[in-house]
Amino acid sequence: MKISIIIIGYNTLNTLKLLLQSINDLNYNDSCEVIYVDDGSTDGSYSCFEDFNLKYNKKGFSFQKNSGRVFARQKAIELSCGDWLFFTQSNVILDPFILSKYQKGLVVPGVVAVGGGVFYQSEDEAFIKYLNHKTRGVHKYGSCSKMHYKHLLFLNCIIKKSVFDKVNFNPVFNSYGGKELDFAFRLNGVFPNAIIACRDALITRINYPDYLTHCLRFYEYGSKNFTLLNVELKKNVVHYPFLLHGGIVLSFLVNVFYYLSSITYKINSRIIRLGLLCSLLRGYYKTK
């Protein structure tokens, strides 16, 4: 089987160099190609890719202006020739054995998508301890076991190309958050129980933002893309449906808990989860 490594990047010149070097360090000798779609960078990222001497065949495309990851990924799919598409970003480093680890999942009958593990690096030690916890996301699943669609992240996943003949990205999601969840939800509807975990297929996410910066992202998510999700997915994200109703009292409490979490989040991971939820709800209530 042929694998297409798909990289989406935007103004990440320094980390892109590290990613490309990690691709050259891959312990993988089967058929493979590397596709880089630059989403309108102004820092020379695309020239870096063009000039970099990769050991695999490569293709590139650069948008003239920033168009968003949905359009960048769609363009990459159009350029790809692989049976399986490995999606990642330009701010990661690949484990040398990642494709070999993924191959164990690709031969499981009926599988159309496999999610890999992510190790996060950041200067915010408390937040990183939360992100890398063994019970969070893909890490909590056994090798090649069925995985909930909500844990399929395009930061590190591999999907059968033929899937995109039936399921594609929704272009209305043009901001942070929600777009991957929406896609995975619809994928699971067409191919039920066909997503598995491969937690040993690892990447390292470099220079991840600190907790408070990530809260700002969740606020943006709540005020924009979250409003576009269907009701089932909204409930899946917030866990407690009554939170979707909003109102003066809930809005007041959410703001209080958010500001408390910004001060105390280093104490306990539960405070981090609460703070991120409150960040999202603050953005969402702003639209109501």
Image (tube, grey):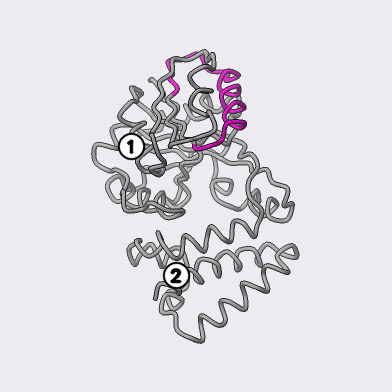
Residue at 53% over, 23% down: 48
User: Which secondary structure, mark 1?
Assistant: helix
Residue 231 place in picture, x, y as percent: 34, 67
| Magenta range | 10-34
- Image side of residue 216 versus residue 64, left or right: right
Residue at 44% over, 32% down: 38
Relative to 49, residue 207 above or below:
below
Residue 201 place in picture, x, y as percent: 55, 33
Which residue is disc 2 drawn over?
284
Residue 60 place in picture, x, y as percent: 41, 24
Q: Quadrant of the C terminus?
A: bottom left
- Residue that lies at the very extreme toward the left in this rendered image: 166
User: Which secondary structure, mark 2?
Assistant: helix
Q: Nearer the viewer, residue 132 or 6?
A: 6
The quadrant where residue 224 appears: bottom left
The quadrant where residue 212 appears: bottom right
Q: How many residues crowd around disc 1 within 10 Å: few (fewer than 14), some, or many (20 or more)?
A: some
Which residue is disc 1 drawn over?
74
- Residue that lies at the very extreme toward the bottom in this rendered image: 249
Q: Are marks 2 and 1 in contact (CB under 8 Å)?
A: no
**Spatial separation of the CA atoms under disc 2 and disc 1:** 28 Å
Q: Nearer the viewer, residue 67 or 99?
A: 67
Q: Is residue 11 magenta?
A: yes
